[in-house]
Image (cartoon, grey):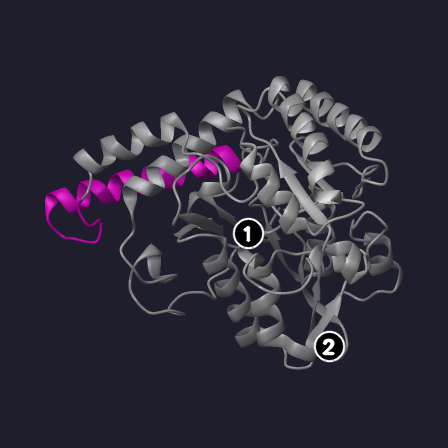
Amino acid sequence: MPFFDHNATTPLATVARDTWLRAQDEAWQNPSSAYRAGTQVKIRLDAAREKFAILLGDEAERYVFTSGATEGANLVLAHWARTLPEDSLIGLNPTEHPCVLAPALALFGSRVRWLSLDAAGVVDLASLQRDNQLGYGAGRIAAVVVMAANNVTGVLQPWAQMAELCQRSGVAYLCDASQWLGKLPSGGIGGEGFVIASAHKFGGPKGVGLLKLAKQSEGLRGQLGGGQERGHRGGTEDFPAIAAMGAALAEAEQKKVFLETDRLRWRDDFERDLTLAIPGARVVAGGADRLWNTVALIMPFGANTRWVTRLDKRGVQISTGSACASGKSGPSSVLSALGFDVESAQRGVRVSAGWATSEQDWRELLGAFTAVAVEVRE
């Protein structure tokens, strides 16, 4: 069955599965235990931390293992709520994932300032610099949240320039790299700011992720209690899952992320042929730099749920957008932030491929869309 919902979750990579099974046999003990077997797992856990430092850059001590990007986002935003001046603001990209939007609004409320976007949804860095909005003090932005790649549209954000701008301005920065890792080269991701990610977005197991701490950041220590992860969080580390996550990312970084050229062509061919086959269909942010695997569409008719269910009956799996928000009523927050009205947003669907997706899979998807269009229109 062609699977086109990789931005929601990916199949477990073979290397990750093999690594997980081996670690479950050899290193299943609690790494916090004082006996030799536990100490040996702790050594392997620290080696895994070093592996991420080599793959993504910076010191190993900056890497904290979490249950995923949601936990990481909540940790960082709660840390900012405790430590930033009470009269300062946070700048938030309005197309962020729900795991960032929800805690940011809950913790900061009226102190959130929405960053300006261009028509494709790319954050306007020039406006931040021109208006001198960054800095400490009443009415100024003391922390910024901008993701690396959008989970719905695939639009790439200028994370490197944002990290540099925040560093120069002396303000905090959080980068959600969940959709970037495993798809594009990730060395130095997030600069000196915080970075969050989930393993299951790039071939690792569910329930494990990473948080890269901001440089020289010690503010998370003791926040949730417990002595794990050098005091940054509580809870027994799941070493087999962490090892599997590292194996999946290493394979992607070393063997996959430079192979996007053909896949970009397959995506572009699909977009061109679909908009010809179904007049009125629109590609969201079609002219912007996007992930090679992602297509967001506004269909000319029919609710997005009808497209998803009809395609599923034909053996093709797509989505209506962020899986984490699929159980909530209302249109996609990303499409709303891009200016689409409610009726248009409710016709939005997302297609997201993986490294194993073939050119023939894209052609089959096109054929399924064309066939289903007749049913949905009726």
The relative height of residue 105 versus residue 199 in the rendered view (above or below) is below
Q: Residue most toward the left?
A: 35
Q: Relative to residue 102, is residue 267 drawn left or right?
A: right
For the stretch drawn in magenta, the main secondary structure is helix
- The residue beneath circle 1 is 323
Label 1 neighbourhood size at 10 Å, few (<14), some (14-19), many (20+)? Answer: some
Q: Quadrant of the C terminus?
A: top right
Q: Position of residue 45 (x, y in %)?
A: 30, 42
Which-is-in-front pick, marks 2 and 1?
1
Decide which of 342, 247 is in the foreground and name it: 342
Magenta range: 29-56
Residue 319 magenta = no
Q: Nearer the viewer, residue 239 or 345?
A: 345
Point out which mark residue 252 bears: none
Kindly identify which numbered label has been placed on residue 137. 2
- Helix or strand or loop: what does disc 2 sit on? loop
Residue 246's x, y, as percent?
40, 35
Among numbered discs 2 and 1, the one appearing first in the sequence: 2
Tell me what residue is drawn at x 67 percent, y 64 percent: 330
